[in-house]
Amino acid sequence: MKKLFGKPESLTTVNHKYCPGCGHGIVHRLIAEVIDELGVREKTIGIAPVGCAVFAYDYWNFDVTEASHGRPPAVATGIKRVLPDRVVFTYQGDGDLAAIGMAETIHAANRGENITVIFINNAIYGMTTGQMAPTSLLGMKTTTTPFGREAKIAGYPIKVSELLVTLEGTTYLARGAVDSAKHVLEAKKAIKKAFEIQLSGKGYSLVEILSQCPPNWKMSVPESLEYVRKEMMTQFPLGVIKDKTGMTV
Amino acid sequence: MPKIIIAQSKCKGCELCILACSKKNIRLSQKMNKKGFHYVEIIDPDNCNACGLCFQVCPEVAIEIWK
């Protein structure tokens, strides 16, 4: 008998501390599988964020460091410039990347740092139990917008990938989701391409992944999947947003 | 015949695999694991075609498929 599907080598056996139905675990596995397939586990350095994925260093079986809230792109810049032969990626949520870390994100992208950013967009602050994030949709009920997000008071959801398109330094920007097996496989292709771009020295790549957060959205798992498909994908359309390489995977 | 191994201690009963299974061959068990979650189980091992859709959506990487 042959093992068709199973835990990749780049994942440890530690049980995740994520809530049931959370998309983080799926993305952790996708990154681990891509790193195994590229054969770069011994020279990969990940940077974990502050947020739900703060314990990511426990789950990956390669070097992972921790950064202050929102600062993974700055830490990644330092590591990549000192050790240019390493594969350096940051793993950030929307509170980390799009709120407190927006300046670091934009400047790292603008400098065209040769790093990969995996951006988990669940439109809410998960770890602190559901406050409004910059990416929260209009009308979305959170603990800080109990009557729904209003543009007049809280502005509009930030589309990070579209925002970075105009910067010359960005090479590859794509958006995926983990609501169904089909989208999971597409997201894996995008992640793999982002790492390949880094390995060939072509510059900054960012893969945004729409993830469900059933407990903080106050929904059941099937409802949260529907919300991702109907509401989030209208606001944040899936696909490749920018690709300067002309490479196909 | 494929062999499906579900790590019951890892499963949190989120039901993503139940929604993904094209053969509707996975269900929640009546029993609970140590964490207090109803874990999932295969209804009929002979009805599984080892497509791996359940594996793709499992956040806990609790499913292993052999063939």
Image (cartoon, coloured by chain):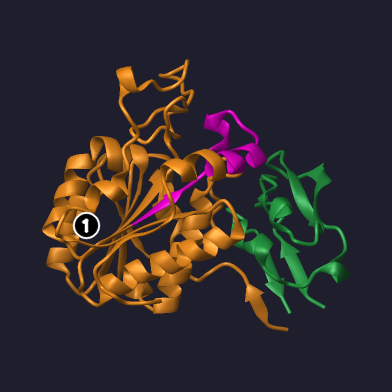
Chain colours: A orange, B green
**Secondary structure under the numbered disc 1 in the rendered image:** helix
Q: In which quadrant of the rendered view does residue A173 lie? A: bottom left
Say whether residue A35 is left or right of residue A215: left
Residue A33 percent coordinates (x, y): 48, 69
Label 1 packing within 10 angstroms: few (<14), some (14-19), many (20+): many
| In the image, residue A168 above or below residue A107 | below
Q: Which residues are magenta?
A: A207-228
Q: Is residue A211 magenta?
A: yes
Q: Position of residue A136 (x, y in %)?
A: 40, 32
Q: Position of residue A144 (x, y in %)?
A: 41, 19
Output the chain of dot 1. Answer: A
- In the picture, which quadrant includes the C terminus of chain B? bottom right
For label 1, the residue is A76
Could you tell whether A204 is left or right of A138 in the image? Answer: left
Res. A90 image quadrant: bottom left
Relative to residue A45, is residue A53 drawn left or right? right
- Magenta-span inclusion, residue A224: yes
Q: Amino acid at mark 1?
A: Ala
